[in-house]
Amino acid sequence: MSSAGKRPRLSHEEQVTEFEDPSLVEKHVEEAQNELAGKGVKICDDLITLEIRSADVCDLTLIDLPGIARVPVQGQPQDIGKQIKRLILKFIEKQETINMVVVPCNADIATTEALKMAQEVDPDGMRTLAILTKPDLIDRGTEKNILAVVQNKVIPLRKGYVMVKCRGQQQIDDKVPLVEATETERDFFQNHDFFRPLLDNNKATIKCLAVKLTQDLVSHIKKSLPKLDEQIKKQLWEVKNAMKECEAGPPQDPKGAKLFLIKILTKFNDKIKSLSLGELFNKENMFVQFRAEFKKWNEGLNETKTSFESSNELNQNYRGRELPGFSNYRIFEMILQNRVDKLKEPANELLNTIKDIILQQFTDVSQQCFRNYPALLNITMNKIDNIQSSQQAKTEQRIMDQFEMESMVYTQDPIYLKFLNEISAEKFSEERLPVLDVKSKYSEMLQAYYEIVVQRMADQLPMLISFYMLKETVQLLCTDMLSVLDGANVSELLFEDSDVSKRRKHLQSRLGRLTAAHDELVNLFEKSDDVVLHYT
């Protein structure tokens, strides 16, 4: 690492503190702890990051976890032990970390709870390194037992053990420099009758520990690279998908913003047109829903094709002032008109149902295109409501016109005879038409004509509704949307919901970090084994 910029840098949450005097580290850390966890002895999951850059320090990232408390002291919650264990597990169970278990030499390592926790998450000891401290406090006669531990003969660990002698509290209080403390530590091991061989085997001193950690971390990272690469690729895919929902956001310059507005309005119009042509599916296919409703309409029409009254009933119920034996065409018209009139209510129900389907589909497209821009979304929804209301009134009038036309009772003679011949046991032709005008044939004649009415209405109503409520509505809406550009306040139209903007910035930041991480991994795969890694 470069020796430039040696000032310590401490950060927590979004606060960053830089200072010149390294002796102030303890003061700033304590202040950060009090701010995060409250003054006292509570704990907090938030990290306090201390960054030291120097050519004289190893390229490592260390996480100092709290010691395991068993009995709460004054001011601590009763479950402080569980809280601390949960916090420790959060870090040591990650496969990318190397777990350093610190055990005093004068303690029984077999009963050390920290080592027990490390073994639970790393049963094979592949990423666990034990640090033995306070070698100057052991009882005489126990040196060989301690050596057996360091030599990996008691509780074997793949990464083994390192013994260190840190500054004592008195040395800390006396502000003994680290350089001097390092020399004192080396002298201790050099002059020790039992522990001197540990120096030659690189199993003693803090300097040896730092080198070993760097080497082990490099080796561990290389083994983890393929898995890390897969994890980063997965997260990149997730972030890119999430970014699609936020889109790129409008440019800040007026010209760029207007072009952006034109682009999203055009995209909306294209989607609406595709929707009306059946080329765009939103949630449920709109035309599948149409067909289901039109089928219900057709089935309802068929259910109204009940047999008309017999000739005797016609004589009794519809006889006018004529003498017996005379026919009255007005009776024929009146019966049919009454029957057709009953179709008006289901016709209006069909119109309302189709309108709701179209409105929902239009709303979905609007949400997709303008969900980040509340002002533009509101304008669009108002336009849709206004156009649909106008078109509904227009369609209702066209439907009423259709019913008015049906009251005329008309069809081509050949068509009428075709249906009549299908119903009647007798066969009729245009030459025999005069003999049909008898009341005994009225029920069949009515039924034949009503079949024609049903066929016309089965197709005509869906066509009317589809044309005015969908096709013509889309044309009007697309034209009206372009009018948004006339004298528009672009900045107001493209004003984003603050949550959307924050989410986009967060995703862009994550995307940048993940992309950089992926690029670094690619470089690591390509470079030789002498690469110096800085792994966080």
Image (cartoon, rainbow, N blue to C red):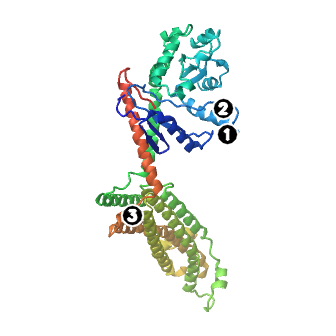
Foreground: disc 2 or disc 3: 2
Instruction: Give the camera-side residue of 480 and 338.
Output: 480
Could you tell me if the residues under marks 2 and 1 are in contact, i.e. CB atoms within 8 Å? yes
- Taking the image as shown, residue 140 lies to the left or right of residue 291, namely right
Helix, strand or loop under label 3: helix
Determine the image quadrant of residue 511: top left
- Residue 70 in the image: above or below residue 456: above
Determine the image quadrant of residue 274: bottom left
- Residue 370 in the image: above or below residue 516: below
- Amino acid at circle 1: Gln
The Cα–Cα distance between marks 2 and 3, rounded to whole angstroms, is 57 Å
Instruction: Specify whether residue 441 is in view.
Output: no
| Residue position marked by numbered label 3 in the rendering | 493
- Taking the image as shown, residue 248 lies to the left or right of residue 431, namely left
Give residue 69's mark: 2
Helix, strand or loop under label 1: loop
The answer to which of marks 2 and 3 sits earlier in the sequence is 2
Q: For the residue carrying disc 3, how many other residues have a C-alpha within 10 Å: few (<14), some (14-19), or many (20+)? A: many
The answer to which of marks 1 and 3 sits earlier in the sequence is 1
Residue located 57% across and 17% down the image: 157
The Cα–Cα distance between marks 1 and 3, rounded to whole angstroms, is 53 Å
Residue located 52% across and 25% down the image: 98
- Amino acid at circle 3: Leu
Q: For the residue carrying disc 1, how many other residues have a C-alpha within 10 Å: few (<14), some (14-19), or many (20+)? A: some
Residue located 57% across and 63% down the image: 296
- Amino acid at circle 2: Ala
Could you tell me if the residues under marks 1 and 3 are in contact, i.e. CB atoms within 8 Å? no
Quarter holding the N terminus?
top left
| Residue position marked by numbered label 1 in the rendering | 76
Residue 367, given in percent of the width and then of the height, sits at 46, 59
- Taking the image as shown, residue 10 lies to the left or right of residue 119, namely left
